[in-house]
Structures are given as C-alpha cells and as structure tokens.
Amino acid sequence: MSDDQTDQRPCGGDSPARLGDTVLTASGWTRRELLRRSGMGFAMLGLAAVARDDERTSAALGAESYRNPLNPRPAHFPAKAKRVIHLFMNGGPSHLDTFDPKPALEKYAGKALPTPNLQTERKTGAAFPSPFKFARYGECGLEVSELFANTAQHIDDIAVIRSMHADVPNHEPSLLLMNCGESRLVRPSLGSWVTYGLGSDNQNLPGFIALCPNGYPILETQNWQAAFLPGVYQGTHINTQHQDIRKLVENIRNDSIPLAAQRRQLDLLAELNRGHLADRGHDPALESRIHSFELAFRMQQEAGEAFDVSREPKHVLDAYGPGTQARQILIARRLIERGVRFVQVWHGAGQPWDNHDDIAVNHRNLANQCDRAIGALITDLKRLGLFEETLIVWGGEFGRTPTVELPQAGANAGKINGRDHNHWGFTTWLAGGGVKGGQAYGATDEFGFQAVDKKVHVHDLHATILALLGFDHTKLTYRYAGRDFRLTDVHGNVVRDLIA
Amino acid sequence: MSIRTAIIAWVAATCGVTTILAHSFAIGMRADENSARTTVAASTLATAASPAERAAQEKFFEERIRPLLAARCWKCHGAEKQESDLRLDTSAGVQGKGVAGQPIAVPGRPQDSLLLSAVRYDGSLKMPPDQKLPAAEIEALESWIAMGVPWPATAAPPARLAAAERAAVDRRSHWAYQPIARPPIPSPVADLNRVHPRLSTPLDALIALPLQAAGLEFSAFADRRTLARRLALDLLGVPLDADTVDAFVADESPDATGRLVDRLLASPRYGERWGRHWLDVARYADTKGYAFAQERRYPYAYTYRDYVIRALNEDVPYDRFVLEQLAADQLGPDTPTESLAALGFLTTGRKFNNAHDDIDDKIDVVSRGLLGLTVSCARCHDHKFDAIPTDDYYSLYGVFASCHEPGELPMIGPPSQNAAYQSYAAELAKLTGELEAFQTAKRREHTELARRNATDYLARQLADRPNVVLEKLSFLVGKPDDLRPKLVERWRDYLKAKSRSADPVFGAWFELTAVDEKAGGMDFAALSRPVIDKLLARPEGVEDGQINPRLKAALAARPPLTRAEIARLYGELFQEALQAWTAAGANGEAENKLPADLRQLAQPLIVKNGPVDLSGSDLKGVLNRAEGNQERELRKKIDAFQATSPAAPPRAMIVADNAQPHNPRVFVRGNPARPGKEVPRQFLLVAASSERQPFRRGSGRLELAQSIVAPTNPLARRVLVNRLWMNHFGEPLVATPSDFGVRAEVPPQHAALDYLAATLFERDWSQKAIHREIVLSTVYRQASVDRPDARSVDPENRLYWRMNRRRLEFEPLRDSLLALSGQLDASLYGRPVEITRPPFSNRRSVYGFIDRQDLPNLLRVFDFASPDQSSERRPRTTVPQQALFLMNSPFVIDRAKALEQLATATPGGERAAVDALYRQLFARLPSDNERQLGLAFLASAGGPAADVKLSAWTQYAQLLLLTNEVAFID
C-alpha cells in the first residue's frame, strides 16, 4: 500500500505497524524506570531488546512477530496521565443524590414537574427530591451530597461533568457505549484501546485488569472485551471477593512443587531450549518463548504481592476502611503503583446501583461501601506521588430520573421510592492526571432530567480520556475488516476545558 | 477516454504491481468527468441570465450563500459526509432530490423546494437539526432559489464516480478481480537445479521465479524426521509416534512422502485439525452471546461443527461445501438430511437481540469469509475504497431478511429408541406442555381482557398522543397502561381494513373519524351533525350500503359529542353484542343463535383472526413484564434441558425462507427508521458476472451461494487457497486473507496463488488436492533454518526462501500434550466438552465448549480466534500467562504424571528411561549432553518430599513437555 492511500483511510491515523515503529525510534522509558517497574533486572532488558528487534521487522501485529504486545510505547503526544483507574458504579448511580444537587425538586415534591417527564425505560411519576443532604466543599465550593463526603474532601482536584448524556435508557446498550463506544456491535473496550496504545509498564501483570467482586456485571466479559484487537488487550477479570491468590489469578501457583524446585525445572528447560535455539540460528519467536518462562516465574511472585493488601501498613488499611470495596480499591492502587495500565473497579456483580426501589436506603449503603476508600485512594495516590500520573474516572452507565418510578409488575417492587434509568443527563467525574479539578462542567436542567449546558456525550468523554493519556482519538486506530476502527467511531470532541 | 481505458487494461494486464498506478488513472478520470459536468453547469447559468446579472448573482452566491452553506450544511452534506446521500456543495446536489424524492431546490420556485421548507421548520424535516437559521439567512436562501439557484462554475468540487463505473474500473484494474488463468509454468532454472536436482512441482517453478529475481534460492530440504513432524502437525494437529517416524525415515522409496501424505489425509484427525481452521472463519461458538433471561447455549451448534469436520474428512468439493452452508435446504431431494447442519454457518454467530445486527453478522461472515470483501462497510455509506455501494449491502440484507430461524429445529439423526431416549422425550414433552399450557392460559386471559377493554383500544386509535389524551377520558374501562402494544397494532390494522364508507358497521366510523375537529372553529358535535344525519338516512340492514340497526339506534340516541366518543359509541355496541354471545354459550353455535345485527356487531371481538383473537399468534407485545419473565423461564428450561440431555437427538440449526420474501430498502445512514429506495435481492456488483440478475427463488440464498462459487467469480477460490496456504506456512500469500478489495496488495507470489486457485477448479474443488499440491512441493519441504544472507534480502520471507518456523496454536499444543502422554481420547463428534476447567476432558480441543460471552482466559491468552466475527487470522503473542498454564496447570501436571509411569516402566535403568521419554516426546534419542543433563536433574531434583509433591521423573517429564521442541514446528 502506498502512503497516499494511507491518507485516505476513513479514520486517518496509524496502523498497528506505525504505532510499533514509533515505539522503536522513541522509547519513552529509562533504564532506571524499567528496573523499578519490572523489578527484575537484566533479563527484562534482554527481552526488551529481543522484542524490539522483532518489532522492527514486523509488518503488522501478527506478521513474523511473536513479540510481547504489552511492551510499553509512547502515546501520540506527551501527557501527564499514564494510567487509569475507572471506578464503575454499575447499575447507574443517581446524579441527583450525589454530585448534581437540584433544590428545585423540593418545590414539586410529590407533584408533577411543570415539564413533561422524558421517556426512560419505565414510567415515572411525581418529582422526587433527594433524600440526602448536600454541602459545599473545598475552595471551589462545589456541592456534593453526604453520600460522598469523603470523596468530596478532594473536590478541588475533581472535575465533575454534570452534563453527560448517552443514547438509550437501558443497561446493556449503555454499558457497551460507556465501555466500548458502541451500544450494540462488538467493539474493543476503552481499557483495551488504552492498553493497545500504550502497552503496559509491568510485564509481570496483565496490562488491563477488571476487578469485580462476586462475579460479573451484566454483559459479563463484554464490558472489557478486546473484540478484534488481540486477546491480550482484553481485561483480565479478578473476582475480588476472594483473597486467595490462586482464585484471583489463573495458574498463578504451582500446588505441587515449591518455587525452588520449579526454578530447577526452568533452569534445565532454559538450557535445553538454548541448545535447541543454537541448532536453528536467529529466531525471535523461540527467544521470546524462552524468556516468557522467566517472566512467568517472576509473575508468580509479583502477582501474589500485588493482590496481597495485608502487606500495607495499618494506617493505610485503616484509611481505606473495611469491606470488599475498600480492599479492591486498595488493590487497584497497588496495581497502578506496579505499572498496570488500566484498572477498572466494578462495584459488584449484576447491577448494584440500579435502585428502582428504596433508593434512600440502597444508595446510602452502596456509597458507604466505597466513599471512604475512594477518598483514601486519592489521598494515597497523592502521598505516593502517583496522583498526577493517574487518571481516575468515576461514574456509571447512566444516571437516574428526578421523578419517582411508578409501580409495574415484574419491573420493580412497587414501593414508589426509587428512580428509573436516565440517559438524558447524568454525572461522571474525572480526577488526577492532567485534569482541571475544582470545577463543575456543564449542567442538567433545573430538575436534573436532561443535560442542557455544554453537553458531553459518552464519545466526548472517551475522546477526552484519550487526550488526557496523550492520544488523538481520531488517530488511535486499528485496521480490521477493511476499515480503520477507533474507539469514538466517527464521533467525539475533546472537552478542552476539562484538561489542565 | 478510450485511450485511457486501453492504458488501464494494459496496466492491469502487465502485472498487478501497478494497481496503484491504475488507480491514479481512475482518479484522473474522475477529475476529468468533473470538469465536463462543471462546463454543463456553467452553460446553464449562462443561458439563464445576462452577463451583468450573472456577475451580480455570483457575487450574491459568494458573499451570502456559499459561506452560509459552508457553515450550516456542509459538515453533514459535503465532501466528507453525505447524510441522507445529500450533498449541498455541488450545484447538482442542490438541484437533486431528497430521500423521499422531493426536489431540494427548484430554480425559481422556493415554495416547491425542500431546502426552504426544511430551514423554515415547516414540515417534519427540520434543518439544521440543532437550531433554526436566523431569519436573514432563510431569506437569503429564498432569494437565491428564486434567482434560479445560480452556482459559479469554479465552485464544483470533485464528483464521485457512480458505483457501477467504479466497479467497471476496478474489475479491469484490480488483480484480485481478474479471471483466474492457469499461469504458464516456466521451464526449470539452472541455478535451482543446483540446489534441488529436480524441481518437484509446477508450483515450485512458479515460486522460484520471483525468488530468483530477488537473487534468492530455496533452502535445502528439511530432513525426513522434521518433515514427518511438520506434515503430521500441519495436517492432523497431533504428532506421529516414534515408530511411524522411524519407518518413514527408513523408507527410501521415491513415493514415501506421497504415501505418508495420503495416509495423513485419510485420517479422521485431518478433519478435526482443518475443521478448526474453518470454524475460525465461521466465527463458531456454542453460545448466543448475552442472552439476558434466555438459555445462553445453542444446544445444537455442535452439529454444525461436526458437519464441518465430516465434510472435510470426506473432501466434499469446496463449491458444494459453500452451497450447503448457505442453502442446504434448497439443494434438491437428493441432499442428505444431515447436511442441513451446514446451515449453522449462518446461525451460530452472536445474537444481538436485534434483527438488523443479526443480518449484518450473516452478511459479514458470508462476504469476508467466502469472498474476501468487506461488505459490512457499506451498511451506512458506500464503501470508501471498494465499489460496494450501500445498495449492494441491502441487496444481501434482503436475502437474509427473507429467512428465519425456526423455533423447532429438524432432527438430523434418527432418535434412538432406547430407554434413555424415551425418558428424554417424556421429559421434553412435559416441559413443552408446561410452556404451552402457560401460553394457552395467557392467550385466553388476554383475549378476555382485550374484549373487556375494547373501548379503550378504540379510543387509543383516535388519540394523537397516546396516554396523555387517554387519561382524560371518563368512559375508559381500564387504565391506559393496560393496553398491549400488539393489540393496539392489530386494532389499527383491523380498522384500516374494515373502515369503508359503505360498511354497515364501520361506515359510520369511517365517516365520523374523517370529521376535521379543528375546521372552522366549530366543535365536533356541530361539525358531525350533518354526517350523522346522512348516516341515519341510510336503510337499516347488515349489507353494504346499509346501516346496522343497532348502530343506527345508538347513533340516534347517544351521538358522540367529541371525536373520542366515537370509541365510546362503538365500544358499548361491541360489549352489548359480546354479552349476548356469551349468554348464548360463547361458541360457534351461540353465534348462529344471535340475530343478524347483533351477530355482525359481535364480530370484532369474536371472529377468528380478529383484533383480540390471540389463538395461534405468539405473545410478544401482549404479555406484561412479569408474564414475559415467566414465559422466558419456561422456555429456558426447555432449552437448557435440550442442551444438557445426552439423549437429545441431534438437530440442525437451519434457516428457512419466509413465505413472502422481503424486498429490501436501503436504510439511509444505516438507520432502519429511515428506509430509502428499494433495491432487488441480487449479488454484489463487483463480484457478479456482467449480466447481474435479481434473485428469483425465494430469499435468493441458493442463487447467492451459486454466485459465490460460480466459475466466473475468481474471489471464492483465491480466498480459499490463500487460507489453505496460510495454515500450512503460518503466513498467507495475500496479507489480508479476508479483504481482497482494491486495497489488498498484489501478493509477491501472485502466480502461485493463481496456480492453486486454477488447480482447485481443475481438480473439482478438492481441498485435499490442494493440500497435496502444497505439501509435496519443494517450497513446503524446505528446511526452516535461518539464512542471514537471505533474511537480509527478504526479512519477512514473503518469497518463501525457507519454511517458516511456527508455534503451535492452542489446540494442537493441547492436543499434543495429550497425545504425547498417550492420553488423547480419539472419539469423534458430539456435544461440546469442558476443556479449560477440571475435570478436564481428554478429547481434542476442537470439541471444547466455546462460550463467546465468557471466553475462558486460557483460550484468550493463547490467541484463540474471537468467535464474535469471522476471523481473518489469529494474532500471535507471547505472554507469560501462556507459560503459567504450562508450568502450573493441573492439566499439564497430569500429563507429566502419565509420562512418569511410562519412564519408570521402561526396563534398563535411568538412561533407558530418559531415552524412552525422548523417543516418546520428540521421536528421537537424546544427545549425550541432553542425556547427561537429564540424569543430573533426576539425581538432584529429589522428591516426593514434604512440600515437593511430584517425583523427579514427573518434574523432568513436565519440563520436557514445556520445551520449544514440543511447541514449535520446524
């Protein structure tokens, strides 16, 4: 293919090979950083050399390349954020009860709103003011509800996007849209794109990890799917309900022999493989596989450490608080600290935040489970000097209605004290790497039904997240089935005001 | 033009390397044609106005109109995007037609111009959609149209060639679209003879030419042992045992290799190995994807997998293979029932809970999988590069929209009559009975409810905005929410069919609903008076032209005072008649007992297929959420039972043609809510023979399949042989195996590709014949050892100066571990088994259960083909998780334990045991050094001890299983 044809591609941008080439000419990592991140000394350097040599000759991922596709590579332009923690409040947290106060609802409490109720999944009725108290926080004085009082301590570092909107009021398409930028068809997830774009700084752990206790959210692994990207870019699910490393990471331990015995095994394996290689001459694929056993051996060690929160000092554990949410948010920090590129923290299996009934009780419980830990996470990242390098994203697949959900057989418990899904307007917040904190961006209408001012579609959020990580979202592409695909398809505008 | 055409033909004929050149000619043509168009536009302008006027008009256009169009319209209707296929950046575009055929801008007639009504927000089309234009801009547009839509000559941007013209150009110029001709076989080349005393095959002579041109030559032959392993793993996916290898090495007869290849191709293991390659293309899985409350598994997907394995083992000709997978149900009475399972090619994809996306999946697997054309790109707009217009996408859409997947799938094997089957059948009947009983009860219940609420349904038909209006009516029976969407639709259709002026019952409905409430500021009662008087003047009776006496009486006594009250009037009459019918016994006899007028009025609520009759229709849109959940649960029980019951007889996942084929319309921008022009069901422009005809038989599936494998269509054969080559060499000849469109490079070994494609046709589409051509060639039998000099010339080995060394994919690696430890369960076919979780099955990996919604990590980290889309080729990555599986998985450790038994059972001490292990695993003896290393390891390893649960032998056997020698094919 000629270069002029390249320019005609619908989405512009680089092919995988191009991206690879960029890596080779401008490796962004220093030796010291490499050693710190990998914690494994010269063997890693050896592999890196091998892998790069391999990449240089490869026409595209897959062609003549058994390289490690998670090798780190720089983005399109320098950026502060290097890694992402995505706190996913699956089920749809109510913006009206958390970060988007609407006192006007009090006036109409129990009565019809003066504006028609927008169509959502189910029928809703009268205005339903928030049962939670709001207060102002920080120098910026933004109002946050009591549910996230701990998180709000960091409000000056948080950009609250109050004008998010999506396409439909149903979980499945909205989850896909939020995670993969497309609500129906099979497309790679945000975490997969980021890992494809940047690789990972730690070869001993997967580059993209999805933490979710007790099982899967609805749509299961589709939420972190790699789709047509190579499978290694798919999120690795960790069931954080477990504490035993064996149950956390597949095949991470050998139950039959101790490490010392395994070391002896691998030493002889390496020697036999070297003899095999010597008979065959140059072959990066053979070399890569030889090294992969060394990587795996070290991964056993490192993975165990990464997930073992008991290694944290007591004051840190206390700061995060008790419970599964606290533990998994702390695990997220430990993973980020070790150079994992993208960590998604799902609140729980199914759709915990989907409070069609009893929102006053349920939202309080859910927030109680995670607010303290989120506050502690930000404090902790600041303490470790990682806050500026880490982008934190908080939100669900949509928000909830300012009007109460009406009873419907088979749909809710008929209590008339919950809220329906709301894709017309909701809140997502960003903090950390490169984010201009201490602001509320955009707004919903007087009652919080619909985004009206400076609207931010999910595609715009994705474009902005990629920009924060150093990518032009129109150029992070992958050639598949005759097209160059991208996370934002043909959409998305970067919201510059969110970037410091 | 003719000279240019000739040049293109010449360019295309000389060689594919010049495709890009040919394209730049094509672009040249576009520019040329464009200038011709602008000349026409300019001359039109010239005749319409004097020079002075024209100058003024141009000034007006440049100052007022062009900036306006650029700022307000071109983002969506310009060179980049053409929403609704509309361009407002050309004179032709502005004077063209909208989607529904309305003229955009009629010179001199603003009032007839869609452009103006759209910007005025007059009709349903409001443009720009976000915000109405300022009044001054609307006025400017109006003046411009009144002037005659002047457009200065220089203003026209390049026009695009029509799809048919593009297709014609591409078909002349693009290498992949050229007819397949058997390339002339060059005579042996002296230099080659030096390395290989004879060129084995014509294929080698063709490969040798480009090699020679690059100053390269073939590598030496691989040794016999290497070749035996290569052949076995390529063709069967499992290694040969040492005795067989030894016998082959010792066999000095000239046809030893040929005989081995014949033996391998005759093994049923061959179909398992190559069947899996095909399943990558077919995006096969055992589950539907996200199924919400439904059963997730496809209980019978495995019958498609088994069909593929069997078809390959039997070497079903490839054209027949394709015909069966698209249209096995239409191939005539001689077709065996079992081949219906082939239709699983269409049905085992992901289900999207959305018909359009399900069809898109079928279009994609057919077009990329079989033709190497990326037709799905044309769902929303014409393909950016290939001559595939949206019309063609919707032509194929029409084929698949004319088919359905029946709920009851046909059995393809006779049910056994044993006790297990009897109890299966009994249980199935019980579960099906439960579902049917539920449905029957619900049908009755909802028919009753719908009868009771007839007035509400009628009122609903009269309400503009459904519930808002309904809530205010005092005479409603139920709540507006109780109305079921499907019944609302059926009432609408029923009334539409019945409502004629002459009808004795619905004549009054027809006349009264036609009264325009808003006319002349009068209320409905006043407006309807003369209408009612006319109706009352009709003679009484139940025939056309008469008025039903009871209707007449009601109309006289309680005439509707509002439009909504028409529903009240009819609702009461229907209820009265229904009560009489019920009192008489509520059956056919009862109906006959009623007087004619009552009988007539009872019809809507009792007639078969009437608006409330639910017998024989599904309950979608009738059940409420809770009832729907109950129904799904019952259905899920049946599906789950069939998926798990070993006695369930095999069934084919077929598609069947609908009674009425679907005449597709192009969906504008891919949006089903915006149907555009109708297109015939027919084959793709770019791949069709010149006399393309609309499909005539039913859905057209069979004709589609026939077009794909037509001798005149070169794509299907080129695509297939390229895939076969890829799976033998690890690399394809054409680098994009599922995209042979104009951006596909000319393969460096083009002649070899065409030779194999021609041979496929000559050998009656036999895939095994192609395998034989490939594996008996010199190019295949070369050593894989590196040659730095050759690598510096052709680092990617695209010319094939050596064999590629390949790492085993997950399936042959796992199968090898089983085979090498003597534990492979060689049984063929059947329901999927669990291979990634204990208890581990010892069957071949192709029989493993594939859950596309939750693909096991293990498969993912080993680069398994995504089962969500037709897989062009698998990625190849090396990640530590692969090593972790081999180091720590109980599955691998179990294999090592079996090898320990083999070693320790060997008589003759440790040395002999080490030798035996080497023979078992590598079909060779260890070198002295290897033997010494092994013995030293055994001496030092120790165990079993307290924390070392494995014996030294098991540890040793395991590490041997982990070697590159096991994982790679030289």
Image (tube, rainbow, N blue to C red):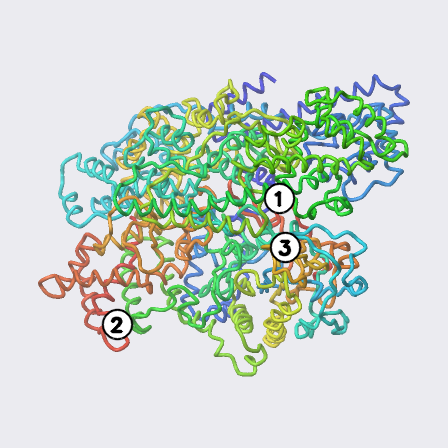
Where residue B893 sits, quadrant-wise, is: bottom left
> Which disc is residue A408 wearing?
3
In the visual, does A417 lie left or right of B627? right
Of all chains, the one bearing label 3 is A
Residue type highlighted by circle 2: Lys
Question: Circle 3 — which element?
Answer: loop
Question: Dot 3, how many residues are within 10 Å of its Cα: few (below 14), some (14-19), or many (20+)?
Answer: some
Give A250 or A7, whichever is nearer the viewer.
Answer: A250
**Crowd around label 2: few <14 · some 14–19 · many ≥20 (10 Å):** some
Residue A417 x %, y %: 67, 63
* Lateral position of residue B465 relative to residue B286, left or right: right
Residue B449 shows which numbered tag?
Answer: 1
Label 1 environment density (alpha carbons within 10 Å; few <14, some 14–19, many ≥20): some
Q: Amino acid at mark 1?
A: Leu
As helix, strand or loop, the secondary structure at mark 2 comes to: loop
Q: Nearer the viewer, mark 2 or mark 1?
A: 1
Instruction: Name the outermost residue toward the left.
Output: B908
Label 2 chain ID: B
Q: Is residue B548 above or below residue B292?
A: above
Residue depicted at x 63% and y 31%: B603
Q: Position of residue A54 (x, y in %)?
A: 43, 53
Instruction: Look at mark 2 in the image and give the residue it sits on.
Output: B949
Relative to the observer, which residue lies in front, B62 or B622?
A: B622
Label whose residue precedes the other's in the sequence (2 or 1): 1
